[in-house]
Image (cartoon, rainbow, N blue to C red):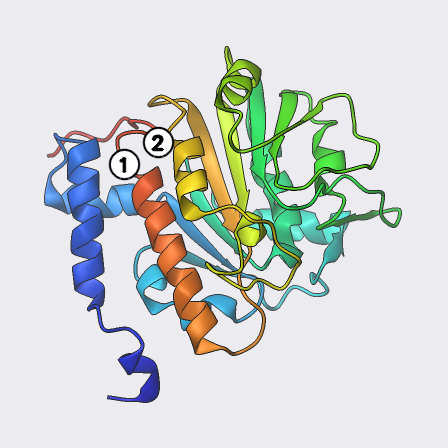
Amino acid sequence: MNALDSLFPMDMREEESLLLQVVMMTYPSVNNHLFPFVLRRILILHFDNTYLFQRRLLSLGDEIDLRDIKPTHLMCSWDTLREIDKRIPHREKAVSFLGKGDYHYATYLFLERLDLPFVLVVLDNHLDGRETFEGYISCGSWLREATGLPHLRRVVLITPQIHAEKKDGKIFEVRAHQSDKILSLTENYPIYLSIDKDVLDKSHLNTNWDQGNLTFKNISRIIRLFPPGKIMGVDICGEPEGLSLYEHTRSEEINLRLLRLILSSRAPGKATLPTAA
């Protein structure tokens, strides 16, 4: 056993078994051989080597290697974004892992694929609504660009900070404890959920951006606000910087907890599964 193996005491098959239990509760009619169909909803985007530390997570999803596409760190040109888009398969109700917050702009690709009116719910310690260089999209500008998408009705930004920047009229800033306001702003429409783990307090995880003070319980309560079938898709970013195996292990555990929560009977809803042959 090497040093890396010692940090992952849970066998990957055991982790898969735990997820299978969640899937079976969510989709009671699913046979075991259809389990891979459900896991095909999980996409792991490799913009860099971040997820190579997260072996349990990698065992559960489809990996999309984007490391040869350059430059993509913090921003990319619209032409490069189109190249990235061609690599990412279209999956109904996908749960996509984007990597560090530096690549949060990839959310835009999943949003523009939605073909009916929706509300975007974002958990982020930052308001990613700034201008950037002409011809580019960045981790700080993607939300500004998203407000121009034809099917987007509004953005509900759940954030620990008070942002003084001028916001687009579609962006509504709320706090994690304002459940009634969150429900009011999202009623009548399906939602897309984008989670940047920089909203979490540093006692949970150290990301490569300044962070908020939310707990995992705060995030869990927000996700559980939404009834089955309301969430059209999810993406998750906010991975740690550097080579700290301790931080990557903590981050992976949060990812797996989010995944179990999202695949539960509360969210993102009960997909139609094929009938066993």
Location of mark 2 (residue): 267
Tell me which corner region of the image, top left, top right, bottom left or bottom right, holds residue 210: bottom right
Residue at horizontal 57%, vertical 48%?
Answer: 199
Per the image, label 1 sits on a secondary structure element best described as loop
Task: Please rate how many residues cluster around mark 2, counting C-alpha atoms within 10 Å: few if below 14, some from 14 to 19, many from 20.
Answer: many
Q: Which mark is residue 128?
A: none
Residue 52 seen in render: no
Taking depth in this image into account, of 239 and 95 the one nearest to the observer is: 239
State if disc 2 and disc 1 touch (CB < 8 Å). Answer: yes
The percent coordinates of residue 78 (x first, y second) are 76, 47
Instruction: Please state, as top left, top right, bottom left or bottom right, where the N terminus lies in the image.
Output: bottom left
The percent coordinates of residue 276 (x first, y second) are 12, 34
Q: 82 left or right of 273?
A: right
Location of mark 1 (residue): 264
Task: Please rate how many residues cluster around mark 1, counting C-alpha atoms within 10 Å: few if below 14, some from 14 to 19, many from 20.
Answer: many
Q: Quick check: 50 above or below 245?
A: above
Taking depth in this image into account, of 277 and 203 the one nearest to the observer is: 203
